[in-house]
Amino acid sequence: MLKIKNLSYGKDKKILKNINLEIPKNEIFAIIGPNGAGKSTLSSIIMGLIKDNVDGEIIFENKLINNLEIFERARLGMTMAPQSVAEFEGITVSEYLDLSKKYAINNWFSDKEEVLKLVGLNPKKYLNRFVDNTLSGGERKRIELASILFFGPKFVILDEIDSGIDFTSIEDIGKILHILKDKDATILMITHNEKLLDFATKAALLCNGEIIKTGSPKEIKDFFEKCKVCELEDKIKEVNNRE
């Protein structure tokens, strides 16, 4: 479904270095790593938000997409739920979902109330609310997920999808992931939360702009835990050296 070949990003300093990934159709592929590893940068490059100073190839369904604009990638069936969810002054939740439906790739759902319930929101309370700063970050994240379900993508990037959503909602996120998978979508999940690896089918660890390891979610989860121990040890050594 998606192939990334020898991808690097940066002008004077390389933020991403020689990334190689292959994500098969209908995979829930997780990329995990610490803050500042380059995860969100990678997702932005895949979606076309960043195109300058990018080397390598991004291939979607056997088509080179490096030079395609965001809307052109969307027409191919790609979409993204960014870490920071946008606000839309003057647009209600109902109107926002209508826009997703208008440009849908697959008509998975037709009922806005059903989709809002799937993401844990009461339709009576939210359909007529505006998608602006009167909603919390977690509420906007859920509405973004609802719009993705209405859009019916082939490939969806979920960048830190649990950001702004309380811990008790992790299982809700898992349900959405499996709804997408059951609809034959392919998911790239960007996260620093190892608990979300439980829902993945494959995973990779990104650190300091490089893919350190790719494997089963359990393998990557265990490896990531060890990496965090190493980070702590390095910090302790740094403090000791100062003393």
Image (spheres, rainbow, N blue to C red):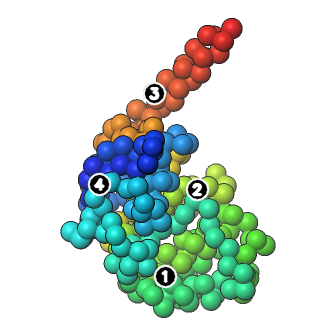
> Could you tell me the amino acid type at mark 3?
Lys
Q: Find disc 1 in the rendering and name its residue.
A: 150
Looking at the image, tell me whether mark 4 or mark 1 is earlier in sequence order.
4
Res 56 label: 4
Residue located 42% across and 63% down the image: 51
Q: CA distance from mark 4 to mark 1?
A: 32 Å
Give residue 243's mark: none
Residue 59 percent across, percent down from the top left: 27, 64
Comparing 240 with 115, the one in front is 240
Q: Amino acid at mark 2?
A: Asp
Q: Give the crowd class for mark 3: few <14, some 14-19, many >=20 residues within 10 Å.
A: few
Please provide percent x and percent y for residue 209.
42, 42
Tag 2 secondary structure: loop
Q: Residue at x 44, y 38 (%)?
A: 207
Q: Earlier in the sequence, mark 3 or mark 4?
A: 4
SS class of the residue under badge 3?
A: helix
**Distance from the alpha carbon under mark 2 to that under mark 1:** 20 Å
**Residue 124 showing in the rendered view:** no
Q: Mark 4 and mark 2: span between their CA atoms?
A: 30 Å
